[in-house]
Image: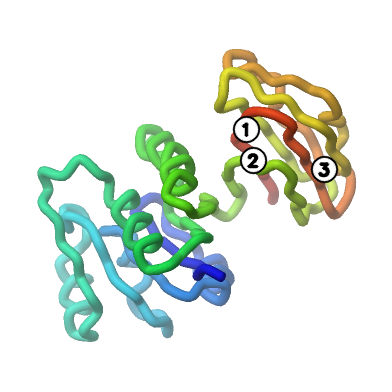
């Protein structure tokens, strides 16, 4: 059985409750450049911090060095994003489940890049989820079940040319036999009608965004 990694990226900083919630689920914590700043001062082991260190605060680097935390600095001429490097590190160290905090925020280009990294993680052999205080963003699987509150939103977008759903339960609008096309986003804002939502995919792959208060 593989390990679970928590990666903190440099987008919108997660609140302390969210950070600790997912720290408890993780075997290793990795900071992606500036994302390591929100790990400072908390009582948690940090496996490593990776990036070109172009955005992390210098005092944060001093604090990390003073605690002998592994710092992996790469060239700023790199092609990979810092979060991509953190995923590579997690997978190389045995992770097959990855929670990513700080991957969403004001920069739309960074958000799009991080959503793309869900596919990069999958190709590398890991299941990744982007998480903030109001959303979980993940790739669909053949069948999966979600814990939810009644009224939560589930939005689905086809990543392949089309995605065909086999069945669903717990949603206001059933997905039974539904075909979503990549260029027709009609899967937005479905709603949970139960405390568990089940989604089964017959063919293709979708992006699932679970939004909540």
Instruction: Please state the horizontal and vertical placement of residue 73, each as a whole percent of the image.
Output: 15, 62
Q: Do the residues labelled 3 and 2 touch (CB within 8 Å)?
A: no
Residue of label 2: 140
Identify the element where label 1 is drawn.
Answer: strand
User: Quadrant where the N terminus lies?
Assistant: bottom right
Tell me, for residue 178, which label it has, or none. none
Residue of label 1: 206
- Spatial CA distance of label 1 from label 3 is 18 Å
Mark 1 or 2 closer to N-term? 2
Q: Would residue 105 be visible to someone looking at this image?
A: no
Identify the element where label 3 is drawn.
Answer: loop
Q: Identify which residue, 156 or 159, lies in the foreground.
A: 159
- Spatial CA distance of label 1 from label 2 is 5 Å
Relative horizontal placement of residue 120, taking residue 25 as reference (left or right): left
Where on the picture, by quarter, is residue 35?
bottom left
Q: Identify which residue, 20 or 87, lies in the foreground.
A: 87
* Residue at point 47%, 57% (across, down): 101
Please say if 191 is above or below 84: above
Identify the element where label 2 is drawn.
Answer: loop
Q: Do the residues labelled 1 and 2 touch (CB within 8 Å)?
A: yes
Residue of label 3: 192
- Residues packed near mark 2 inside 10 Å, few (<14), some (14 to 19) or many (20 plus): many
């Amino acid at each position: 059985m593989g390990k679970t990694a928590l990666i903190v990226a440099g987008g919108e900083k997660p609140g302390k409750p969210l950070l600790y919630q997912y720290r408890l689920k993780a075997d290793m914590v990795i900071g992606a450049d500036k994302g390591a700043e929100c790990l400072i001062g908390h009582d948690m082991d940090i496996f490593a911090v990776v990036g070109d260190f172009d955005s992390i605060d210098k005092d944060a680097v001093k604090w990390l060095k003073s605690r002998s935390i592994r710092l992996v600095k790469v060239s700023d001429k790199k092609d990979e994003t810092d979060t991509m490097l953190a995923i590579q590190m997690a997978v190389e160290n045995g992770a097959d489940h990855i929670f990513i905090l700080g991957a969403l925020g004001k920069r739309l280009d960074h958000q799009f890049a991080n959503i793309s990294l869900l596919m990069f993680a999958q190709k590398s052999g890991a299941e990744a989820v982007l998480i903030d205080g109001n959303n979980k963003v993940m790739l669909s699987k053949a069948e999966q079940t979600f814990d939810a509150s009644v009224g939560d939103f589930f939005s689905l977008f086809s990543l392949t040319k089309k995605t065909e759903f086999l069945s669903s339960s717990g949603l206001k609008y059933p997905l039974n036999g539904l075909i979503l096309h990549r260029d027709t986003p009609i899967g937005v804002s479905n709603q949970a009608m139960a405390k568990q939502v089940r989604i089964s995919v017959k063919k293709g792959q979708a992006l699932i965004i679970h939004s909540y208060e």
